[in-house]
Image (spheres, rainbow, N blue to C red):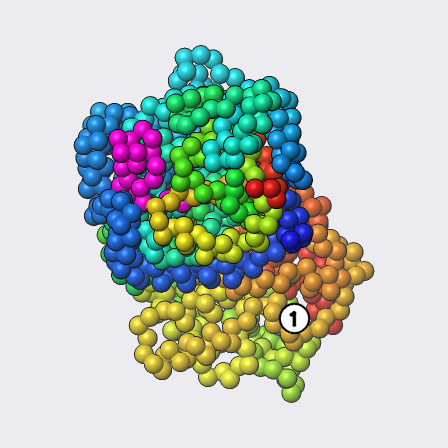
Amino acid sequence: MNNERIELFKKMAEDASAILYIADTENTVVEYIEKIMKLNGYSRFAAPGMPAALCRNLETGGFEKIGSPLRDRAGEIDAGIVNASFGIAETGTLVVNSDNEDIRLATMLSETNFILLNPENIVEKSSDISNELNTWFKKNNYTAFITGPSRTADIERVLTLGAHGPEHLHIILTNNK
Amino acid sequence: MAYTSNKKYRKEISHALDDKFLQTALGNFTSNYPQSRENAFNGKNIEELIHGITDLKRKSVSHINELYSLFKQKATEHGAIIHLASDAEEANSIIEKIASEGNVRSIVKSKSMTSEEIHLNDHLISKGFEVVETDLGEWIIQLRHEGPSHMVMPAIHLSKGQVAETFSDETKQSQPEVIKTLVSVARKELRPRFLKADMGITGANFAIAGTGTIGIVTNEGNARLVTTLPRIHVALIGLEKLIETVDEALKILEVLPKNATGQKITSYITWITGRNECKSSADGKKEYHIVFLDNKRSEIANDKIFSDILNCIRCGACANVCPVYGHIGGHMMGHVYIGPVGHILTYFYHGIDNAAFLADNCINCLACKEVCAAGIDLPSLIKEIQIRINERKGRPVISKTVTALLKNRKMFHRFLKIAKTGQKPFTGNDGFIRHLPLILYKEHSFRTLPVLADEPLRDKWKSIKPVVNNPKLKIGIFAGCLDDFVYPEQVEAAIKLFAANNIESFMPEEQSCCGLPLMMTGDKKNSKIVALRNVMAFKDGGYDAIVTLCASCASFLKGSYPEMEGFNDEEKEQITRFAGKITDFRSFVNKYCSFRSNENVGKTVTYHAPCHLIRGLNLKESAENLITKAGYKFVRSEFENQCCGFGGTYTVKYPEISAAQLEKKLDAAEKTGAEILLTECPGCIMQLRGGADKQKRNISVLHLSEILNCNQNPANVEQKIK
């Protein structure tokens, strides 16, 4: 694993106002999400495409899982949890394959977005994944590059987080699948 | 808004200059932007990136039809329905038809300049559809019934107070002037609109033909909701957004946000290929239409002069660095598309009436050309537009006067000599005109004008030319009008320095104005006549170099002469040879001259970089080195690289803006505490020195040639400053 690249990714993601957490085991992933959710007084989460075990653990912890279709409960998603396929170090960007509508909504309609990323999948620059993008784009596809939380500077150029999408973005680096 | 006369246009400009909030907002933005941009590009080779985009966009534009066919094939394979609209009207009716056939009632939109271009909202609303803009800035201006004042920051002209007022009206409850709260008002108000909308309309930043994919660049994330929640998605895309590959899109993306706002990347980039899952649609997949807009684009693609305009990636950087935009904002500087590129796009997309007076309002400082992400030579294209408008609408009086004066050298020089006598009643004893003749209006009184020299350089040349025995170099001096008739002392100092370095100077008498003022008024024909006359004047001198102390002349002689068309081969060869010898004063001094250090004078110097030196001639090395070498303490002033506001005939046409820019420059220079404001162009000197005098500023404005010390020319700086 290229530690320099991970460090760069961390720095750039943090520059873009994302919060970075390195989780050693599956347990620590759940613990971290639970901790943040409790801190914010959240009770509901959506985790499209995530392993059943992670959802079960959160449910055991007392949180309610919102199932598909998320659009029917759009206003209720406190936390959205999804996986990223790649990270791009030089901009701190997450690449999320979002063919699934619920993945799009979990990353857009939640107040806080948790995105899990395997550090082995961090590349240096966007052109390093152009082959993968080309393969994806050969089929019907919806892909998102996500860098930091949603933002706007449309009023007096003052940067404000949480425009239409999440106000907080937590990136969890984890090797566990 | 279309302006029916220059007078009405200038009146609107005055309102903008009086708008305190606008002035602060634009001032803050334009002064922060260069640093943010530099930080964003940190470690990258900007020029290389820009060249890359220029090449790939040129290639795409020249294959625009093939790319369209390929895109159509690929996107259709994935279930998208492709439409091609030849003009705004057709695009509007295609989208209206999609909406009616889809039983659409409400529509949400994400930001799209192309939809602004065709006035799509007005059309759809007039047909009974509910249309809501969801980009915060666009929503604000939609509620206020205004147009965007910047390509990527549409509401930059508004204060939080104005936004609070607008939102209070919309929500029927009082909203505080707190930005964070106002943003959450928009979030809360717009969420239900997204959810109930039947159709979402977006633009796109990329249309990748090889895969039939579109790419949308946003920060707020509204485009993701617009393309996800409603059951129908319509993307409206200008044909010039077509490129071939994903890699090309990534290349543009590497520059777009950095150049636009100094952001490394935006929060979201959305890539969509074909129909995707949509749980509110009958078959579980979204109905997906892409409407390509031609609206003269395929015609422009084949235009030898203007095809580069389709390279534009809509980053808005040309406005960010434009000193004119920095004072008056977008509404006075465009119709729908604003800023430098807006001058050109307005002419093509919104017609000559909406473009009239805009192209004229270019100070030709070249800052937009330097910053353009796609390497477009915006100032030259703006000039071309001006020529076309002049051809149709007739040339303004000022422009005709300039032509009449300059096309005949003898008449011009005789005029200047008569003017010398004519100005006597108005002249003070300190080199400035103290009382303006009535022919000049009060709006020109922001700076004093210099008096014409007692004896022009050409008349006293024989008496001042130093004798040099066995010179190591023989050079021609191209004086230019201002150094010839107003500031001969600048050249006098220079030729003494040259003589001290064993260099002999000559001044061919047949030389005249360089022709730039003619070009600036859009008179291409006569600038060519003047150009050839100058080239011929120097032809037989056998000079090793032709040196000029005027940055504007130098840039025009060296850069623009060889690009003029319509000469025969022999003339062309002469022009190339002439242009090759043109050297600006500083570069020549650096290469061939030594001088004594003036350390004992102990003066502090700040510097104004002439536009046509650093951008026209691309002299990137700072003047700091030479100033320090000459024994002065150097201190950099803010906006060193920004135009002084002179711009030749510009200052006559738009004195209010010229004055505002001058004030900004002098404020910055004075703030450094320097005693001398140094520059290298007599045009800048006329503006800066006149302003410093009129406004009683505590700083003296000098030409670089005047502070370099040598035996023949003891610089006597003490006498030259206050």
Question: Residue B165: percent from the left, percent from the top?
Answer: 45, 19
Q: Residue at x 25, y 49 (%)?
A: B76
Left or right, B457 with reference to B299: right
Query: Is residue B275 in the magenta section?
Result: yes
Residue occupying the far right of the picture = B600
Q: Let me know if residue B367 appears in the view.
A: no
Residue in the image at 58% along x and 54% along y: A124
**Is A25 left, or right, of B83 in this rendering?**
right
Question: Magenta stretch containing residue B572, yes or no?
Answer: no
Q: Is residue A117 left or right of residue B143?
A: right
Q: Would you name the residue on which mark 1 appears? A: B590
Kind of element beneath mark 1: helix
- Give how far across and how far down residue B420 sits, in percent: 48, 58
Identify the amino acid type marked 1.
Answer: Asn
Crowding around mark 1 (Cα neighbors within 10 Å: few <14, some 14 to 19, many 20+) is few
Task: Using the rendered image of the protein, determine whether residue A138 is visible from the camera's viewpoint.
Answer: yes
Q: Residue placed at 32% from the left, 79% from the top?
A: B568
Picture residue at 64% right of the left edge, 74% below the top: B591
Residue bounds of the magenta highlight: B271-292
Please determine whether, in this image, residue B36 is positioned above or below residue B309.
above
